[in-house]
Image: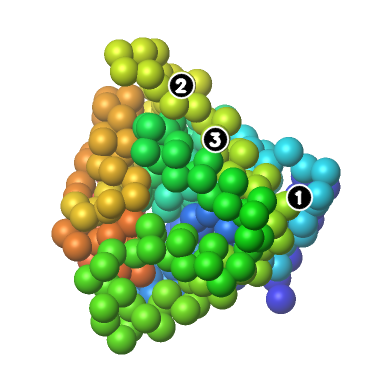
Amino acid sequence: MPFADVNGTRIHYQIEGAGEPLVLIPGLGLDYTYYQLGVPAMSAAVRTIAVDPRGVGQSDKDPNCEYSVEVWADDIAALITALGYDNAHILGTSLGGSIACALAVRHPDKVRSLIAVGAFTELNRSVELNYALRRRLIAKIGMSEEMADFIALWIMTPQFLESEHGQQVAANIRAGVKRNSPDTYVAFLDAILRLGRRETGGQPQPLTAALEKITVPTLVACADNDHFIPAELSKVIHDAIPHSTFVEIPGGGHIPFIEAPDLISATAVDFIESVSNSRG
């Protein structure tokens, strides 16, 4: 299995296809298989590098690490170098999109283009409450079947869960969530909560404020029916990166790579090809 030693830890990754490198960063507590429904289409056009971030999946766990989007972003930057690339296209979904944004801010030389899907660089009240509630529930019931069900209910739409395919995917998601230890998952939640919530009419939180530094081609995408991370948080990112492109994915849910994999994969590939063509 491929691993890279970076920043004092060991990161697991999976490579498919050939061509320009595209790093895929998954959402909270889930491993590289997060993108398994989209990789076949994307790897036909580019080289996909699906990553287990530090603390997740087969990557090393560090009980003493204070996880943050900055720590994860620094790991991805070091991984790109370790794999022999000067830079790469970066795609992240949900928390992975937050990490992708932090990477573009902190290591602009490592980012060829940025795609943030259902991402957030700060929280609103409902999202903050959801993550804080998870933290409190874990203290009572751990990473139990009930906790996994609670998470699945938020990250998949009711319509998708009604389908046989949706039930199979939900079972995989629940299993992936439960593979996290309670302490590690709480540390991940703390990393998210530290992003902060903007008060009504208040100043943007630090990561949002730093987005204006991003100059690489950027696509900000979200679904039109994400009932967990609302489109308004993607629009915060889009508004903060003046040259970015914004697109809504019909029926994509919170994780379009699960609920609308063909459409979001085609959208990502089209964007990357447009970037490559513009570079000559």
User: Which label's residue is closer to the chain start, 1 or 3?
Assistant: 1
Which is nearer the eye, 87 or 278? 87
Task: Give the x, y percent position of residue 188.
Answer: 62, 47
Distance between the Cα atoms at labels 2 and 3? 11 Å
> Dot 1 lies on which element?
strand
Q: Residues within 10 Å of mark 2 (few under 14, many from 20)?
A: some
Q: Hey, which quadrant is residue 269 in on the image?
A: bottom left
The residue positioned 33% from the left and 25% from the top of the image is: 240
Q: Amino acid at mark 3?
A: Leu
User: Could you tell which of marks 2 and 3 lies nearer the N-terminus?
Assistant: 3
Closer to us: 63 or 72: 63
Q: Amino acid at mark 1?
A: Val
According to the picture, the residue beneath numbered tag 3 turns out to be 193
Q: Earlier in the sequence, mark 1 or mark 2?
A: 1
Q: How far from the left and from the top, in percent, is residue 199?
A: 38, 18
Q: Give the residue number, with chain letter if any, for mark 1.
A: 6
Q: CA distance from mark 1 to mark 3?
A: 26 Å
Circle 3 — which element? helix
Kind of residue at badge 2? Gln
- Say if 115 sits above or below 264 in the image: above
Q: Which residue is mark 2?
A: 205
Residue sitting at x 71%, y 76%: 1
